[in-house]
Amino acid sequence: MSSLADEVERRRTFAIISHPDAGKTTLTEKLLLYAGAIELAGAVRGRKTDRHVVSDWMDIERERGISVTSAAVEFDLGPHHLTLLDTPGHKDFSEDTYRTLFAVDGVVMVIDAAKGIESQTRKLFEVCKLRRLPVLTFINKLDLPSRDPFDLLDEIERVLGIHAVPMNWPIGSGDRFRGVYDLQRGLVHLYDRKARAHPAPVNVGSVDDPRLQQLIGDDAWKALVDESALVTGAGTTFSHQAYLDFQMTPVFFGSALSNFGLEPFLYALTELAPPPRGRESDRGIILPESPEFSAFVFKIQANMNKRHRDRVAFLRVCSGVFERDMVIVNAREGQEIRAARPYRFFGGKRETIDRAFPGDVVGLVNPGQFGIGDTLYTGTPLTYPPIPRFPAEHFGVARLRDVRFKQFDEAIKQLEEEGLMQVLFPIIGRREPILGTVGPLQLEVLAVRLKDEYNVDADVESLPYKAARWLTGPADKIAATAGTTGTRSVKDRHDRPVMLFDSEWSLDYAQRTHPDVQFLAVHEG
């Protein structure tokens, strides 16, 4: 039987981040296909298709061909055990997307070669920066018209503030794309637009090898020689430690849809990406090899099984060994809980497990015992830091069409516990709760789920606010902010003061006119 240290070493827990349509869904499927976890790559192209990415399980996801919630998929690739946490890539993603990045040890960033860094990529990268998560970059769609690779690398460094080190180099792009040259190993991977299978890489040693000129033609060869000389002349070489320290991102070029460039990228994912590492707690760093079990709840999903109306808490195991039927303690209330029905997931499918190791994600049926951010442990008590709350950007009011107030209140409470939205309460004016989400689609998701899962008919009316901030400072100074132009004063479920803003101008004005008050975009816990 392998040791705990061996199990930790072979694990890789990661997420894929991107802007919509950069190719995250396709890359996810190709990873699973390559690992033998699925038999058919059916990347979703639209609402009419009958295939859906395996990590999407909610009805609205399958209908729209998008990811709305974060799902966990586990699979083996060679000697390594990989856990991929799927972060919704649609522009209307949720706060759930941010929280998922607190449960991984590394990130794959997918960038469209024609579009470069886009808005959602920037937002998600900021969370990676907050956690200093190592980032592997895959620049996708090289078989389509693309931007200059030097421009793309410069944009990564300029916009994201991290050194970008190419691990391979594209030979042309679009209809002139001939393949990539491996800068680390002197291999050339040739791209055959017509062939389904790509030829084995050719070891040419260096760009000066005459065989390379014969393989790709004079013009492409001359361009590669010139460009690779510029790359080498820049003097930036890859450092594994710098990558682990969030100072550098290795960059790979390829095409996920055509499977091109995936093999060297997968090699990097398993060989370069870190295994589970120690986590900060109120007792200091807890190493994954520590014998006592610990974990934290990073996600709660209601009604994964509609027949049983169950809620599942997703745990990220941090140390020790999780075992079925073990008694664990919830640090928030000191409550002992028997882990009687632990699951692992493959999209919407679940199977009962007996054991799990650091880096693994375990689902426990949650009859109201867990909340997002809860620390679970055995043995010596400890608490992991709370998962920050991120500001809502879209707001609405749900209004019942009937008188099922009890069902409505329970549904709102459960969906808030899950993290679908934040519930805010007006300090003055109408007392109906305001629902805040990160993306506008979540307001639509809310109405659909109220009907499908709770049999509650409600209309969700949008409100004109664009941003929210938590307020901290002297009570009298916070009180003086009420009535500021373009704002509304509310409070959250924990009675913390929050202000809503109808524009960036009103947010800036409030900050300038109330210097003694802090307007927090992220709240710790």
Image (cartoon, grey):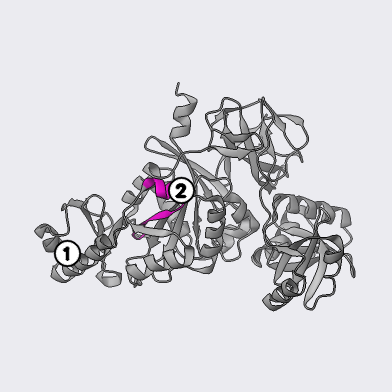
Q: Secondary structure at mark 2?
A: loop
> Range of the magenta residues?
240-256
Q: Position of residue 75 (x, y in %)?
A: 46, 40
Q: Residue at x 67, y 75 (%)?
A: 504
Three-letter amino acid code at disc 2?
Answer: Asp
Q: Residue furthest front?
A: 516
400 left or right, relative to 182: right
Along the viewing direction, whichever of 511 and 306 lies nearer the viewer: 511
Res. 43 visible in picture: no
Residue 216: numbered disc: 1
Q: Quarter holding the N terminus?
A: top left
Q: Residue furthest top?
A: 1
Within 10 Å of disc 1 (Cα), the crowding (few <14, some 14-19, many 20+) is many
Q: Position of residue 425 (x, y in %)?
A: 84, 62
Closer to the chain start, of discs 2 and 1, is: 1
Q: Residue at x 66, y 63 (%)?
A: 438
Q: Secondary structure at mark 1?
A: helix
Three-letter amino acid code at disc 1?
Answer: Ile
Q: Residue at x 44, y 67 (%)?
A: 158
Q: Residue furthest left?
A: 210
